[in-house]
Image (spheres, rainbow, N blue to C red):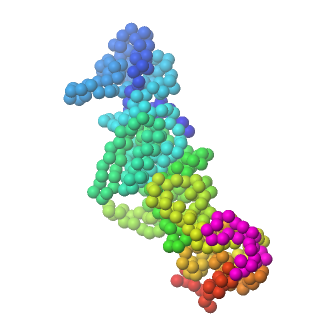
Amino acid sequence: MELHLEDLLKVKKKTWVRLEDKIRIELFEKVLKKTRSLRKFAKLLKKELNIKGAYSNIYKWYKGKRPNKDNTKVISHGIPLHVLKFLSNFTGVSMSEIEKHVDFIKGDGPANKVFNPKFPIVLNEATASVISHTLHDGYFEPGKLRVVYSNKEKENLEHFKESVIKMFNASKVEFGEILDLDGVTRIDVPNIVGYVLFCFSLKPGNKIENDTKIPYAILNAENIDVISAFLGVLIGDEGNVQPNRNCGGEIHIGLNGAKENKPPSLLVGDHSLFNKIGVSSNNIHLQKKIITKKGKIHYRWYFLISGQRNLITLAENVRIPTARKQQDLENILSSYEKLYDSILLNDKFRLELFNKVLQKINNSTFELSSLLCNTFSWNVSEASINDWKKGRYHCPIEVVVVLMKMINLSLNKLLKNVSTYKPLKNSRPIQPDKSLLRTILNEQLDRINLSPNFLNQSLLHI
């Protein structure tokens, strides 16, 4: 999707464009050749565009400057976009040529400016980041189409500003910044940012009451980098990256909605985008009811991302703007390689082993996850169990030993079906030394003792 300068006319808000001197003078010289005077052109503008005081305005547009309200200095002055479009048609200078020579652009009123923007504006990583920041920790004001972004994290604030600049590929953007009493910084951006987001189908207004959705262009983007940028901002703004005490961890994504029986559409869209980059998550669940300071009732909904395969895929595709959260994710990933030896069993035997174990607990991976969590001091997610069962990753020897004991599997039979072995702190699988592996497994068999009521210890029964 591309947004050209003249596409901003669809917004129905006054947009001011100051052109570089050379092309501005060229445009008005062409006008003078056709009309012989600016006064005649003013009459034409009044007739065609119903512009009052057209002559005094034309002189300001021609010069590209005007006195300020106090008449104490001269300031740069732009041309209304709809007038610029008329000038383009009248002089034969195309809008595609005009948009290459923009000095600054701004929205209606005393708005901040964007300097030297490059058109067309495209749906790239920067644009996706601005949209995601606005949806998750921002406010898109109806009427004025003003965008305000609020956050406490300095890195998120800087990332938002950098993304706005990159979205326009601008030399400079004027921002307003206010520090609230609760430590939250609010960033005001030029109104023209809101006009651009409106053209990318972002709807203004209260996100919860309006049940705001992710724009179609993001949901159906073919460029994975666009989706990854959007999701990185989501985690930075709304995600909670939670390492477990010893190994593994999860990412918690939560948003407020207006309904108790339906999650917010924004969160549903976020959930679907993770699937598009190959990251599976659990279903969206209702967490709690919230009463706001204004007495309104909202509902907190969330989903979790866990499991070694999911988190590795996420880390390969997504960069979180917040360094603290990015480091937590990296710590989770490094923990998978530090704590245990692991083995990969032959396909047929591996599936039989997991299926026999699951049959003992109602074919529930949740039950197995709970049992293993109670046995070890580290979290074992359902996603990890599915990864081990399908052979995506080597299974920790401690887990294999528990599975053996659950179905009384002999050590000799297991050893015959080991495909590869990953020693501690060695990322590459090797052919197993059966004698060494027998010793390691025997140590674990002696160390791990399952109580007689082991199968009644799952979290479902706590």
* Image location of residue 358, percent across then percent down: 68, 78
- The one nearer the camera, 195 or 377, is 377
Residue at 48 percent across and 48 percent down: it is 129
Q: Is residue 380 above or below residue 135?
A: below
Q: Is residue 438 on the magenta stretch?
A: yes
Q: Which residues are magenta?
A: 415-439
Return the x and y of residue 332 as percentages of the image width and height.
Answer: 54, 65
Dividing the picture into quadrants, the one containing residue 299 is bottom left
Residue 113 on image: x %, y %: 37, 35
Q: Is residue 109 magenta?
A: no
Q: In the displayed structure, would residue 65 be above or below residue 197?
A: above
Q: Quadrant location of residue 258?
A: bottom left
Residue nearest the observer in this picture, 174 or 48: 174
- 216 relative position to 389: left or right: left
> Quick one: 23 or 61, which is closer to the camera?
23
Q: Residue at 55% x, 83% y: name it.
A: 461
Residue visible at 47% across and 21% down in the picture: 88
State the image coordinates of residue 322 (x, y, percent, origin top left): 45, 55
Observer able to see residue 261? no
